[in-house]
Image: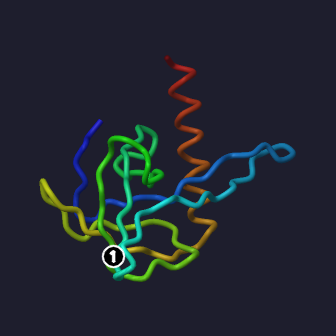
Amino acid sequence: MTNQLNVGTRIYRPARLVAAGDGYQVDIDTVSMKDFEDGTIMLRAAPREAYLPDWLAVPWETTGGRVCVCDEPIPDDWTYFEVLFADVNFVAVSPVAGDPEELRRKHLSTASRDEGSEATS
């Protein structure tokens, strides 16, 4: 698993899968971020095997992962952050408001990969 973020990598908004009838419903989570109240927001991202090459946004209080900086307004309906610049010391990201259905599909597909890897372990 890689610990490097590259330009173009997506950092997806987290969600939980909840059983609903014959399938699953995806409940989108809100992630805590550090707001400096000057237009700068810091968030934390972590690699997760099922999401690679993309990453997942994790709560600010989480240890590990990479700290990312966003200096753009973050819409309430953000789907992911896209890495604009990354080096050893700094990662700049931009929020992308997208189709909530795209986010649901991403989480459902990663859950399927997780189940498949557990079955083969």
Figure quadrant of residue 92: bottom left
Residue at x-position 33% and y-position 45%: 65
According to the picture, the residue beneath numbered tag 1 turns out to be 40
Q: Amino acid at mark 1?
A: Thr
Considering only vertical position in the picture, is 58 above or below 115?
Answer: below
Q: Sort mark 1 into few (<14), some (14-19) or many (20+) by Cα contacts within 10 Å.
A: few
At a point 45% along the width and 65% down the height, the residue shown is: 80
Q: Secondary structure at mark 1?
A: loop
Residue 91 placed where, x, y %?
23, 62
Residue visible at 34% across and 82% down?
38
Against 116, residue 43 (above or below) is: below
- In this rendering, the answer to whether 36 lies above or below 24 is below
Tell which residue pokes out farthest to the left in this image.
Answer: 88
In the rendered image, the vertical position of residue 23 relative to residue 76, given as above or below = above
Q: Percent x, y for residue 62?
A: 42, 44
Depth order, front residue of 68/98: 68
Residue for point 44% across, 55% down = 57
